[in-house]
Image: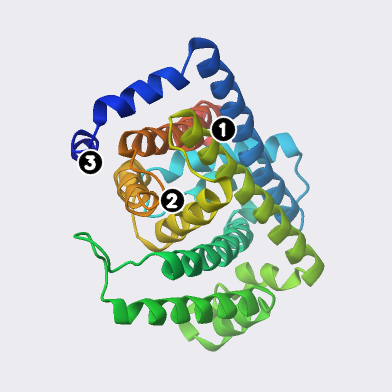
Amino acid sequence: MYLQVIRQPHLDHAYQTIRSNLTVGGVLRILAVQLALMLVNWGIEARKWQLLVNRLEHISFIRAFRATLAGVSLSIHTPNRVGEYGGRVLYLKNKNKIKGIAVTIVGSFSQLITTIIFGLIGLAYYLYHYSLSAGNEAVMDPRWEKFLLAVLLLVCIFVIILYFRLQWIVTLFEKIPVLRKVRIFVAIVARYKPRELSILLLLSAIRYMVFSAQYLILLGALGVEIVWWQGFLMNSVIYLALAIIPTFAMVELGVRGQVSVYVLRQLSNNTAGIIYATAAIWVINLCVPAILGIVLLLGIKIFREK
């Protein structure tokens, strides 16, 4: 990321643009908006989790929000933040903890579907106007671009069908001897009705819009001049790539920065602005909630006893 910034043509001009956009008052306003949207972002995720776990036990929104932040804290050392499940279920009763992991996966499933749907729309736009095989940093042969889009479309259709047919997952656990013993812990996912699952998808789409807006606001504030709808489509390609690439949250910033520069360079040559916006959104949406979650984890009985 450092090399990408210092190699940017007209770097001094980029810094002048950033400084002219970021007055003291402007920085405070942007920071206030970003923190407010961060709370909305994770608040929606907490609401999703609250709706899911109400099948197991009734919890308040505040408790669900605390559990969500605790999950963020425990996820930073795990691939693609899978540790988030373990952090959340600490706030459930012991008898519901394993089942809680199953229902948490359903919520992540709904967010993944949203990411894939918007990502496919963005990728179709990207491939129509640009190419993954262009330039010195080509990522694939041009003959594979349409194949990639077709594969992702099939995956999208499959996961949507599977999402509304969660009973298939329970059936799979019944048929595999090794998994049969834990079938009772995943049977809960088959109880959700299509209407409930549709509400989760709607909340996931709203949350997607929120963190996309956060990124677009930061890009504009740092002098990355792009048309908002083009930026939204390009951002959807970035989020799709991040969902596919295995990574740890602690090193995700480097991957996120490289992918963002590769995709958004089609719209702007302000590499410094793109990377600084990427770093800022990573800190605001991941590091700040993780710090808050660590504080909340200290109050959980299991940690106090340790």
N-terminal label among 3 and 2 = 3
User: In which quadrant is the C terminus drawn?
Assistant: top left
Q: Nearer the viewer, mark 3 or mark 2?
A: 3
Q: How many marks?
A: 3
N-terminal label among 1 and 2 = 2
The kind of secondary structure element at disc 1 is loop
Answer whether residue 52 is visible to the viewer in this image: yes
Q: Is residue 75 above or below residue 188?
A: above
Q: Is residue 106 above or below residue 290?
A: below
- Tell me where residue 146 sits by quadrant: bottom left
- Cα separation, mark 1 vs mark 2, equals 21 Å
User: In which quadrant is the N terminus drawn?
Assistant: top left
Looking at this view, is 17 or 76 the one in front?
Answer: 17
Tag 2 residue = 81
Q: Amino acid at mark 1?
A: Ile
The kind of secondary structure element at disc 2 is loop
| Rendered image: mark on residue 4 | 3
User: Given the current orientation, which residue lies at the most extreme top position?
Assistant: 24
Tag 1 residue = 300
Q: Is residue 17 above or below residue 149?
A: above
- Tell me where residue 159 sits by quadrant: bottom right
User: Given the current orientation, which residue lies at the most extreme bottom position?
Assistant: 175
